Amino acid sequence: MKYRKLVILDYSGTLCLECVRFGETERLTEALVSSGLVGLGVETPDFFWDKVVNRTWTEGSTTAVGYAPLMKSRLGGLVDVPKEKLEQAVDRFVGDYFASFRVDLRWEKTLRRLRDRPGISVLVATDHYAEATEVIMASLAALGIESRPLGHVHHENTGGFVVANSADLGYPKTDRRFWEQVSRNFSEQGEAGVILVDDFGCNETVGSAYSMWPRVLKRMNETVAHLEEIFMKPIRVITFFPIDGKAPPGELYPLERVIGEVENLLQL
């Protein structure tokens, strides 16, 4: 079957909201305390964002190193504590984070309809750490949705979703090479259009440099431009702006509205 429509769903901040809420100041502080990182040198959320995540994000999101190993390596050079103690605290923290990495259940019915609708191919795309791929697939599986990592699927395969993670592909979604790899795996996708549903990083916590509004707009423009060039047709974009009103007035999209737009556009 040729894919009449390709639906691209962002994961973190769109399908999954709890993972971005994990980074909110109060909740992040609790996680730093409960993991034991507070007392080992990671005393505040500001330290966590400024000295750890923002300094290592590029490597973490485009290589197979992984969140936990990268965090251990970075903190090992910043704090003077026993290695074993630090590694145990990092493992607890990262485990808590990925425990929040679940599909929001408000998406459940829509995702199942997408799965069951003939002629629709679904790609779950994310800029994230290497560990995220398996966690995303497990979260989809909990909803009864089969998925495969990009590179393990070819255009003749049918059924299930495909997961494209920047850490696996080596490039972020703003890089043309990310989407070239998608295109090689789906040579007949988007015959009747491509739909992109994405928050473009807007819903990430304010502590993350990733969520800065100028960067969100730049990320959106670059991503859409690459998709149009590669798929050679206009891309229909459904933006998810945002949790807690961080986007300019008039651009606020509650999750239910985003889901409704997807269902109406595809007549699910």
Image: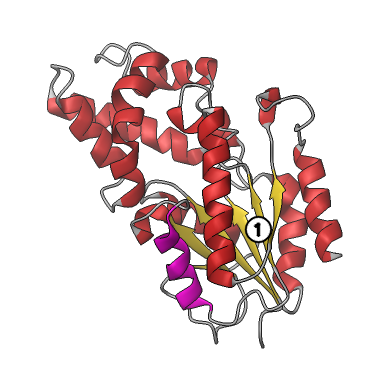
Q: Name the residue under label 1.
A: 143
In percent of the image, x 43 and y 69: which residue is there? Answer: 181
Q: In which quarter of the image is the N terminus?
A: bottom right
Residue 184 falls within the magenta-colored stretch:
yes
Q: Position of residue 144 (x, y in %)?
A: 65, 64
Please state the extent of the stretch shown in magenta in the rendering: 175-186
In percent of the image, x 52 and y 22: which residue is there? Answer: 206
Instruction: Sort mark 1 into few (<14), some (14-19) or many (20+) by Cα contacts within 10 Å.
Output: some
Majority secondary structure in the magenta region: helix
Q: In this view, does 141 lie above or below 57?
A: below
Q: Position of residue 187 (x, y in %)?
A: 53, 81
Q: Quadrant of residue 58?
A: top left
In percent of the image, x 81 and y 65: which residue is there? Answer: 266
Q: Is 259 positioned to the left or the right of 267 in the image?
A: left
Tag 1: amino acid: Leu
Q: Is 210 positioned to the left or the right of 142 in the image?
A: left
Residue 37 falls within the magenta-colored stretch:
no
What count of labels does the image hold?
A: 1
